Amino acid sequence: VVVLCVTLFGSSLSQDAFVFDDFDGQKVMGSLDVLLMGAFAFLGGGLLEQLIWDANVLFVIGFFTFYRGKPSAWKWSLAATVLSASFLGWDEVLAAENGRTGKITSLEYGYWLWLAGMLSLTIGALWSKLSNRA
């Protein structure tokens, strides 16, 4: 589980995350760019973007609690998965600090790998919790 979720999450960083329409055409957002810039999204008015980015923090907490064998790992990883999956319902993202938004036209491999990393940790943590009950 540890190797799988880290591999998926790490692989996502080398891929494009999503494509959106901007005033000068389509713009492709790379996953690494989203990870690095997402931490500061709230500074540009992107409170919802910040919330989605916080799934990374929850993933890291979930990963370390799972790695240390803590039973709460599934809660952290499930919260990360729910937040990251909620992006599926988005139609637009913040395109500029002035509040301009752009329509999301496609979700790319980076997003799907990111989500798969979150989901694999959640499944592994739940499986671990349930198998330790027996």
Image (tube, rainbow, N blue to C red):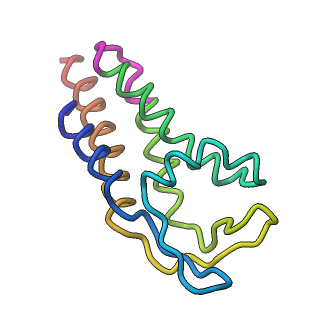
Q: Is residue 123 magenta?
A: no
Residue at x-position 42% and y-position 35%: 59
* Residue that appears at 35% across and 14% down: 70
Whole-percent x and y of residue 24? 63, 85
**Residue 95 located left or right of residue 33:** right
Quadrant containing the C terminus is top left
| Residue closer to the observer: 28 or 70 | 28
Expressed as whole percent of the image width and height from the top left, the position of residue 103 reads 61, 79
Verify whether residue 74 appears in magenta: yes
Q: Is residue 5 left or right of residue 90?
A: left
Above or below residue 118? Residue 59 is above
Q: Tell me residue 46's x, y (percent).
A: 72, 54
Q: Is residue 111 above or below residue 133?
A: below
Q: Which residues are magenta?
A: 67-75
Q: Position of residue 2 (x, y in %)?
A: 22, 30
Q: Residue at x 50, y 80 (%)?
A: 105
25 left or right of 110?
A: right
Q: Quadrant of residue 63?
A: top left
Residue at 32%, 45% (x, y): give it: 9
Q: For the image shown, how many numbered marks are present on the structure? A: 0
In the current view of this chain or complex, which residue is farthest to the front? 24
Above or below, 98 against 81 in this view is: below
The N terminus: image quadrant: top left
Left or right: 90 in relation to 63: right
